[in-house]
Image: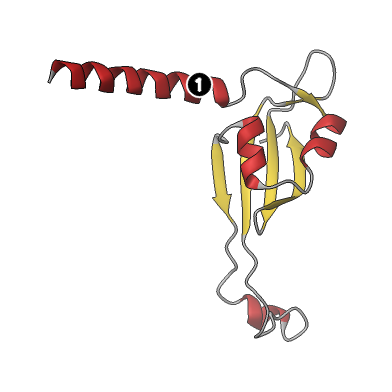
Amino acid sequence: MKLYAKISAILVAASVLMAATSAFAGKTYTEDEFISGFSGKSKKLIIEKLGQPFKKQQSVKPSNANNMIGTMGKQQDNSKPVQVEMWYYKNLVRYDDKHTYKETEVTFVNDRVMNIGFFNNR
């Protein structure tokens, strides 16, 4: 029983350390490095390179959106639904030698990076 307790304590400690180091490990990128390195990439690669984001948001279509846009932008019956998700990272991208953007937003469309935004005003 004592061996089981020691093993579980070691596993918990190791997982905490892994999470802390993989979540970004102090690396920063220039704007160009980040855009060229991550545009069009998969969620799997983003997690491998950047770790888990500090915040995730799922895009939600308003309930009356089809009534507002009419038939022009209406989703076709035979088309697949589009999954949009935004991930947020802090202090990841530099805009000069001493400063980083407070927040970087990575937008995924169907599990691929489609948009990247850098913000200081959030």
Q: Residue at x 59, y 32 (%)?
A: 51
Q: How is the image coloured?
A: secondary structure
Q: Nearer the viewer, residue 67 or 23?
A: 23
Is the residue 118 above or below the residue 21 in the image?
below
Residue 98 drawn above or below residue 39: above
| Residue ranking furthest to the left | 1
- Within 10 Å of disc 1 (Cα), the crowding (few <14, some 14-19, many 20+) is few
- Rendered-image quadrant of the C terminus: top right
Q: Is residue 117 left or right of residue 9?
A: right
Q: Amino acid at mark 1?
A: Ala
> Looking at the image, which residue is at 85% across and 19% down?
96
Residue 116 in which image quadrant: top right
Q: Position of residue 100 (x, y in %)?
A: 75, 22
Q: Position of residue 35 (x, y in %)?
A: 82, 38
Q: Which residue is mark 1?
A: 20
Q: Nearer the viewer, residue 120 or 93?
A: 93
- Residue 24 location, quadrant: top right
Q: Quadrant of the N terminus?
A: top left
| Image point (60%, 58%), residue name | 59
In percent of width and height, residue 109 lies at: 69, 57
SS state under label 1: helix
Residue found at x 34% / y 22%: 11
